[in-house]
Image (cartoon, rainbow, N blue to C red):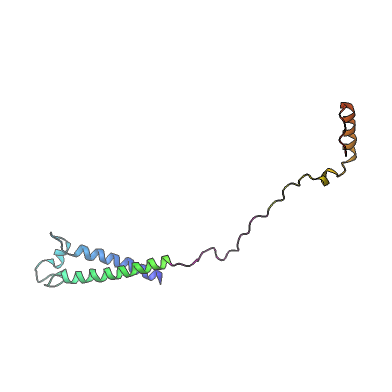
Amino acid sequence: METAVTIIHILVSVIIVIAVLLQSGKGASLGSSLGGSTSSQAIFGSAGPATFLTKITAGAAIIFMATSLFITYKTAHRGEESIMRDLPAVSAPAETEAPAAVTDETKAAPAPAAVVDTAKEAAKTEAVPAPKE
């Protein structure tokens, strides 16, 4: 429906442009060659194109305004439609675990035997007291 109204809107706008260009202005214009003169052999008849082109312009302007309002209304009141509606929702990425904090429990964990022996020997040679466990 919107496509049909848009096509009508474009056609009516072209008709308005043509009708305005055909109307006779203050000087000699395109309208004078198509019946703006007083010749009896004019295309639009002896009454001239003024009444015919005025009616066409007025009718086209009314249709143009109606289609403009319709297109504006339909554009403003579109639903939350999306081409992405069929895709699954993307969840937040998995949070990575923060490094474990040093607690009393981690301090009390026994160290490997080789590390303990090396630490005790280094403490003896440097005369630094070994940490109390």
Residue drawn at the location 22% of the way across and 64% of the way down: 20
Q: Where residue 65 sits in the image (x, y, percent)?
A: 31, 68
Q: Quadrant of the C terminus?
A: top right
Image height check: is 71 above or below 130?
below
Q: Where residue 37 sits in the image (x, y, percent)?
A: 10, 66
Horizontal relation, residue 68 to residue 47: left or right: right
Magenta part of the chain: 77-94
Q: Quadrant of the N terminus?
A: bottom left
Q: Where residue 115 sits in the image (x, y, percent)?
A: 87, 37
Which residue appears farthest toward the top when viewing the image? Answer: 126
Foreground residue, 83 or 33?
83
Residue drawn at the location 13% of the way across and 66% of the way down: 36
Question: Is the stretch drawn in magenta largely helix, strand or loop?
Answer: loop
Foreground residue, 114 or 53?
114
Indicate yes or no whether the magenta region holds residue 90: yes
Horizontal relation, residue 38 to residue 86: left or right: left
Residue drawn at the location 57% of the way across and 66% of the way down: 86
Indicate yes or no whether the magenta region holds residue 10: no
